[in-house]
Amino acid sequence: MSSRYSKDWQQIALTIKEQAGWRCAKCSRQCLRPDDDITGLTKSERTKITLTVHHHNRTPEDNRPENLIALCTTCHLACHIRQQSNITPGQLSFEFE
Ligand SMILES: [Zn+2]
Ligand SMILES: [Zn+2]
């Protein structure tokens, strides 16, 4: 976990996801809620429907609501791959909770 993140990031991210109704803002995929039963799902199935929070301006310190958007893992990766060709999924994981 990067130290660039504020201590209350988890709470901020949770609020954004709740406001989004646990749906991806891009593809409208319904993602897992914290209390969803994930037994029977493989790790990759789970990853695909995990909602994440993306920073529009890629500044992790900037946690203003207008800078944050709830995206499923697939859309989130696509976002970074398109705009930052040198980023790998491994590098991106720092942004996930
Ligand atoms: Zn999506
Ligand atoms: Zn992102």
Image: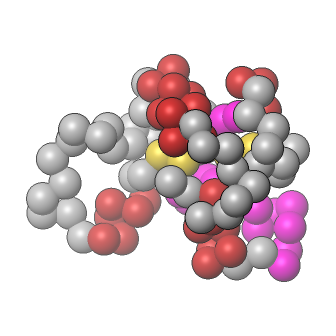
At a point 78% along the width and 32% down the height, the residue shown is 67
At a point 69% along the width and 50% down the height, the residue shown is 5
Q: Is residue 80 magenta?
A: yes
Residue projecting furthest to the top: 19
Judge by depth and name the residue closer to the eye, 90 or 23: 90
Q: How many marks?
A: 0
Residue 72 vertical position relative to residue 77 in the rendered view, above or below: above
Judge by depth and name the residue closer to the eye, 55 or 7: 7
Judge by depth and name the residue closer to the eye, 14 or 37: 14
Residue 54 vertical position relative to residue 84 in the rendered view, above or below: above
Tell me which segment is drawn in magenta.
Answer: 68-86
Residue 53 vertical position relative to residue 90 in the rendered view, above or below: above
- What is the quadrant of the N terminus in the image? bottom right
At a point 43% along the width and 33% down the height, the residue shown is 22
x and y, in percent, of residue 44 in the image: 36, 71
- The answer to whether any part of residue 28 appears in the image is no
Q: Is residue 26 left or right of residue 52?
A: right
At a point 77% along the width and 27% down the height, the residue shown is 64
The quarter of the displayed image where residue 13 is located: top right
x and y, in percent, of residue 2 in the image: 67, 63
Q: Is residue 85 left or right of residue 6?
A: right
x and y, in percent, of residue 4 in the image: 75, 55
Q: Is residue 79 magenta?
A: yes
